[in-house]
Image (tube, rainbow, N blue to C red):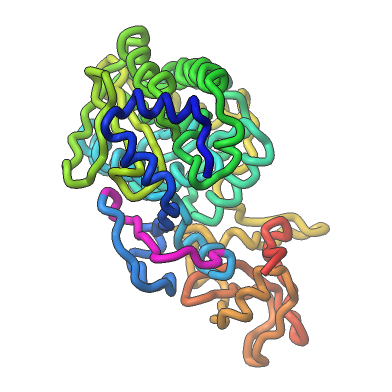
Amino acid sequence: MKLPEEFKNQMEELLGEEADAFFSAMEEAPAVSIKLNRRKCVEPEITGYTDLSPVIWCRSGYYLPERPKFTLNPLLHAGVFYVQDASSMIYETIAEKVIPSAFDTGAPLRVLDLCAAPGGKTTSLINALPEGSTIVANEFIGSRANVLRENLIKWGYPNIFVTNSPTSAFTKLEEEFDIVAVDAPCSGEGMMRKEEVAVTQWNTGLQRQCADLQREILSDAIEALKPGGFLIYSTCTFNREENEENLRWLVEEKGLCAVDMDFPEEWGIAKGIDTPYPCLRFMPHKTKGEGLFAAVLRKEGDYPRAAGLSETAFVKTLKKHTRIIAEGIPQTVTKGRDEIPAGESVLATDYNPDSLPSVEVDEATALSYLRHEALRLDSEVGKGFVVIKYKGFPLGLVKNIGNRANNLYPSQWRIKFL
């Protein structure tokens, strides 16, 4: 990897005597890590991967010694785990820390993830949320929003809305969210050793452009945030303009208060550079993961304030001002004149396993099912809708008609290449 000379000069100025260690780390292979869906599984061994080691700052995260072909593991498609960079898993731990300290423990919350695709940080927030909480995950770019929808439906948390709207749309839901997350579009310096495009697209103009866009998005986020609520701001880049300078702007010009997470020093997470305000820097020469900047801020005002919109009014307002592409986990689908169970319905974490008969399949059959192929089930399996399970986890539905079972797995999700 050949880093841009101007980027190298910036990092040398930013890091000083640590720069050599940073550049050496950038030449190392990226770490491989997964996160468990805590509402579906707490034992990492069920994934079938061995020699796992824990991600020290996230109790749901584990490193793998090498990168397998994740697509070939049916449990990925069942939403049992998510492939995610370890640094980004800090979102779960941030939420775990601020929720009991600031809100009534166990009380449902409203959470907005403004720049959510492909869904890694949203699923981290879901892992930490009290039951009954509502999460709205938004993505402006249509193709990325569809990926977000798929990943969140597989994760199975029922109280979700996936939206495909500009962030300004959420200013219409003024002060309705307890937590707003902004993992902002950025210059991507922290992804340079994983994605070649992050190297080839880099320039100082992109940094300035991203910093301006980030402030626009953050302004929208603040309007949607309740008094006393929390803003989580993050980027996957290293420069101060998109990181510490935006943090300074949030505190000094927008009136938010930066919150010190006070995480253990042994986690290796660096502090901010040339700033009096607390923030987190995941640097590849200090932590096992890609580059990430994160800051937690609290909006001025007493919490809880007077009740906001009722749930019915909230949903009505959300539907009026945003484009919703998913509302909860689909339960039924129209086929001709009939309403039949949706294949996605069995992925929900609140799915009743006694509602339909099920059949356990081996790995080869599971992969055949995920390719959207027709199956032949054992003769003792009754006719009608049947849940296909792998290692006890639902993958989806078939309609067994005797000589074959018609595959009801969503065709747009099918595995196309093995």
Q: Quick check: is 218 in the magenta stretch?
A: no
Residue 177 or residue 116, whichever sits in front: 116
Give how far across and how far down residue 39 sits, in percent: 39, 58
Q: Residue at x 28, y 24 (%)?
A: 273
Give how far across and how far down residue 134 sits, in percent: 44, 39
What is the chief secondary structure element of the magenta stretch?
loop
Where, by quadrant of the figure, is residue 261 drawn? top left
Q: Is residue 1 above or below residue 344?
A: above
Please report the bounds of the magenta region as a residue range.
57-70
Q: Quadrant of the C terminus?
A: bottom right
Q: Residue at x 39, y 40 (%)?
A: 23
In the rendered image, is residue 172 in sight? no
Residue 365 or residue 383, whichever sits in front: 365
Q: Residue at x 51, y 36 (%)?
A: 3
Q: Residue at x 35, y 60 (%)?
A: 62
Where, by quadrant of the figure, is residue 197 drawn? top right
Q: Quick check: is 65 in the magenta stretch?
A: yes
In the picture as drawn, the residue positioned furthest to the bottom comes out as 379
Q: Is residue 145 left or right of residue 103?
A: right
In the picture as drawn, the residue positioned furthest to the top comes out as 253
Give how far across and how far down residue 238 sits, in percent: 40, 30
